[in-house]
Amino acid sequence: MAYSDFTLKELKKEFNISNKVESLFDETALFQISKNLKDDLKLAQTLPVRSEKAKSELIVMPILLELMRANQQFFTIYSGDSLIADREKGLAGECDFILAKNTGSFDINTPIITIVEAKKNDVESGIPQCAAQMLGARVYNNDYGNSIPKIYGCVTTADDWIFLKLEKEEVTIDNRKYYLGNIEELLGVLQWIVDYYRQELETDS
């Protein structure tokens, strides 16, 4: 079994991870995006962006790079890397994107956000995989002595984005979606999450 094989029912059975749907973000500030990102996204609209690979390269990665630059590379981005937390329990496999605290190390260090690219343009279909990867990130962090109370995740079709939070033994699925068409709001949510981790990790250091 790998991250992509899990269902929410199996996460409950194997790890006692329950789930609920409610609002995750009461209020977030709009993110002022750069001209470079505006131009990149405008150019992407003129291209045949149909495959997951194309969406990853032309839409998702530029958004994540914009967020990374705005935060003085507080985190780094791993694309297509494997996160091996516990092979025996199925918490292993390739992740579309992992955002991890930037420590300058070659290996993944302190994963904080996992991002799943939804299959067949169905954003809800990626929720179980994302939840499993978030659990994997927590186990991975704990094994390296990096205990973090909350792990955030996201599933995206590039156009639609839905966020999740793992805290204690419960995954909360946000009751609203965010959209590429309102990129300032979408990046505002991502910035809110980064701000949480910056405060959490700097407090612990």
Image: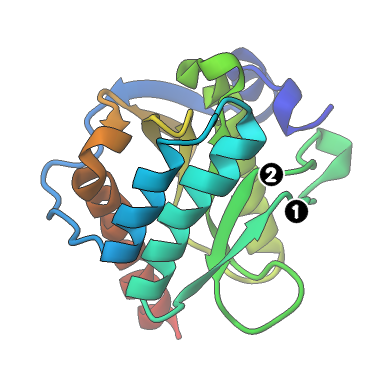
x%, y% of residue 101? Answer: 53, 72
Q: Residue at x 42, y 75 (%)?
A: 201
Q: Amino acid at mark 1?
A: Asp
User: Pointer 1 and pointer 2: residues touching (CB < 8 Å)?
Assistant: yes
For the question of whether residue 193 can be seen, the reply is: no
Going from N to C along the chain, the mark reached first, 1 or 2, is 1
Direction right: furthest residue? 88
- For mark 2, give the secondary structure: loop
State the residue in front, 104 or 89: 104
Quadrant of the rendered image containing residue 103: bottom right
23 with respect to 158 (left or right): left
Q: Quadrant of the N terminus?
A: top right
Q: Quadrant of the C terminus?
A: bottom left
* Label 1, residues with CA under 10 Å away: few <14, some 14-19, many ≥20: some
Q: Residue at x 40, y 74 (%)?
A: 69
As drawn, the label of residue 81 is 1
As drawn, the label of residue 95 is 2
State the residue in front, 104 or 24: 104
